[in-house]
Amino acid sequence: MKMTSNNALKKTALFLLPLILSLTTVGSAEVTGPYFGQKPPGMEPEAFNLPPFPNQRGLGVFGNSGKEFFYTASDAAWNWSRIMTTHMSKDGTWTEPEVLPFSGTQIDWGVFLSPDGKKLFFGSGRPIQPPNPASWSLDIWMAERTEQGWSKAVKLTINSDTVSDYASPCAGNGNLYWSRHPGGIYRSSFINGAYTSPKRIPELGEGGSPFISPDERFILFLNRPKMMISFRNADDTWTTPRDLGPKIDNKMTMKGGDWPALSPDGKYLIFCGSGYQNLYWVSAKVIEEARDQVQHTGLQLAP
């Protein structure tokens, strides 16, 4: 049984807010177009403004080339937390958010889509055996997108029995990367339809809130107050983590930042800076610049 206290986990959840939203209604914002109609950034980080969604605050992830958005909403006291979704209609407007069918009655926190958009991973404190109460001691769960909609959520076998496992980014081949609290960043390979036993990635230290690129060439993660990047070597080890430079560092604080992510088309890096409320995006070319610098050291990186 996991031993983390309810109050401690509530504080941890507050520490895991990459996309905190001050929320009212989508309709009042009258936003249209992919990425809520915002002009794409260049090599300098620019503010990324979300529309005023209904209800509270939470994490967010784009899918379908920026035309759908999933996020977590909760009440102010963190007594409940649920996963919401909105999508862009044919006329370019965004729908009113709805609760996903497998969420809404438990504590569900954080959300990631697989690169093909067919699987959704999230953290949940829901009990395996109702009517036991939900808690903020989280495990990784998954639901699959079908022709009829989203499937029933299932708990993955990779979870720890003693500490919390947070929502898991997924590579294109199905491999999962996630952080444990405490414990660092872990990986589980997806082989023959099943996940292997989790293995900690020692090169990443005690970092958290990872994002893995779909091709597994690099991993982004937080080592507050900086966002770090590490590249996979040809021998499946990882390079010494490095930050992405002062342009990114200047937007981060010890209390800010979490779960950096790429846009679905891979063109933009989206992250949360100071205070968990200031969102930014920047051209993903900053990642290729960092890769070029690492390659100049003579390391043999994975192709």
Image: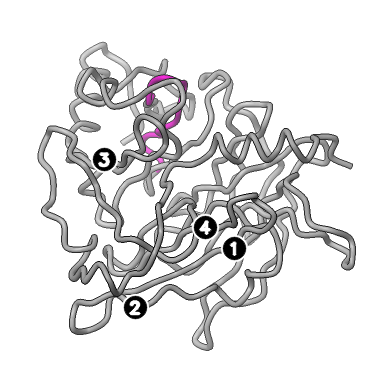
Label 1: element kind? strand
Q: Residues within 10 Å of mark 4 (few under 14, many from 20)?
A: many
Cα gap from disc 3 to disc 2, whole angstroms:
23 Å
The disc at residue 280 is: 3
Q: Residues within 10 Å of mark 3 (few under 14, many from 20)?
A: many
Label 1–label 4 contact, CB within 8 A: yes
Label 4: element kind? strand
Sequence-first tag of 1 and 4? 4
- Residue type, mark 1 in image: Arg
Answer with left or right where residue 263 lies relative to residue 77.
left
Identify whether 158 is placed above or below 217. Answer: below
- Residue type, mark 4 in image: Thr
Q: Residue furthest bottom?
A: 148
Q: Residue at x 61, y 26 (%)?
A: 184
Q: Residue at label 4? A: 72
Is residue 224 magenta-colored? yes
Q: Residue at label 2? A: 95
- Residue type, mark 3 in image: Tyr
Q: Nearer the viewer, residue 25 or 100?
A: 25
Q: Provide residue 278's location: percent of width, then percent of height.
A: 32, 38
Q: Nearer the viewer, residue 299 or 4?
A: 4
Residue 244 occupies quadrant: top left
